[in-house]
Image (spheres, grey):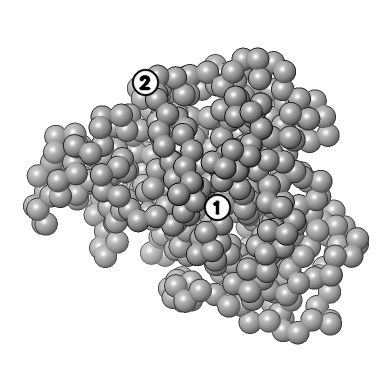
Amino acid sequence: MLTIKRVATVVSNYQELGGEKDNAAPAVEGEAKGCGRNCLGKCCLPASDLPLYTFKVAGEDCAEESIFSQRPPETSFLLNLLLGQWENRMNQGLFRYDITTCKTKVIPGDHGFIVQLNEGRHLKKRPTEFRVDQVLQDFDERKFNFTKVGQEEVLFMFEQSDDRYSHFFPSAPAIFKPSSPNVVAINVSPIEYGHVLLIPRVLDRLPQRIDCASFFLALSLAREAADPFFRVGYNSLGAFATINHLHFQAYYLASPLPVERVPTLRVMTSVSALRNGLVVSQLLKFPVRSLVFEGGDTLWDLSNAVASSCMRLQRNNIPFNVLIANCGKRVFLFPQCYAEKQARGEVSQQHLETQVNPAVWEIGGHIVLKRRKDFENASEDSAWRLLLEVSLSEESFQEVKAHISEAVGLHKIGTEAYNLHQNEEAVSASSAPAATLHWHRDCLVMKGRA
Ligand SMILES: [Zn+2]
């Protein structure tokens, strides 16, 4: 068994109360007797009202999508709501520190790595031991989970709309059948403005693992926020997730992330008769061997391709991070091995001393530093060398690509130089056979439901 010791990030003010004692005792079915903490557990949530945002499922046909993309940019209602409510919680003093006073700078160089000095995030906590060699782990009732979070940390519930429009209800019953509500809550240790958690079906106590419906929800959050500076991220177990209760993160950072600017090479495509085939590209000139997914006729196409890929990595015990960028139009997949190398004693002492945990935001190029000297001495070279430690070897990365090609039913493209992303040429479909996308069975069900 491989483990590392690290200081867990405190994402909720209820995390340090000794999660084992709090509402661990299951409430009697059908009997809503609050535990007195107004929490997200079975004791309180079914009898509660919370704000509700319902999102339309956009992009089910290309016509609608093209109209959508031609609209002049405007701040979406959802993003205004999210950021407004987030500021409201900041004014209520729910955060552990004031993120707006943390110093941030862009490191000079070709890539524009962003570093933040955040001395408050990890103080006053002892390191905990984490198992890093098992991407899929069962939900553990004895550990902290999001049902213990207080409702004041929740911004709103986030559900699919019943019609073709988005709606907002300032107050709605927090019980849905047959599944439980998805909630958007603050991260009380934010690393950026608007840093929140998306917790799918909170009462169902899902472990930290990607499934088609949950990933579609995360992609829909990015789509509905409709601002390229609002990103959604995911860390698997073994890739620096510290809470084994399904959650995504999201935040607003008004700057391009380095990973969003690197050139890419198309390596796989669905090359079917679809008007807008799925394309998977490999990042070039980037220290972490990574893939980016784009295209598809609908949001479901893109969502299912990424989810199927993640599910394949999970089953093969390969830790990974996911970054949803550009309003849900681009999804980066970062398979990684830093924690495993750390557990094996293969990470350089210099990087260990910084205590930087390279999770989704760090790999994207937004690096949160804990020590002032690391912040002051930060250079493109030091950021690059840190991320080099995260990357799989070329051999392992080839295996990942083979897994994904098979899981999604994509065809490999020859790696001709003209394929560079900047050229924006259409992928030649003439010589490739028509492909059937091999969605995971769960994905097929969900695709039909939309
Ligand atoms: Zn309760």
Name the amino acid, label 1.
Pro
Mark 1, residue position = 319
Residue at left 9%, top 44%?
33
Name the amino acid, label 2.
Gly
Residue at left 27%, top 52%?
203
Disc 1 from disc 2: Cα separation: 35 Å
295, above or below 323, in the image? below
Q: Which of 215 and 19 is in front in this view?
A: 19
Which circle marks residue 223 in the picture? Answer: none
**For numbered disc 2, what is the local secondary structure?**
loop
Point out the tag, 1 or 2, that comes first from the N-terminus.
2
93, above or below 134, in the image? above
Inspect this view and state whether residue 297 appears. Answer: no
Where residue 378 appears, x then y in whole percent? 72, 22
Foreground label between 1 and 2: 1
**For numbered disc 1, what is the local secondary structure?**
loop
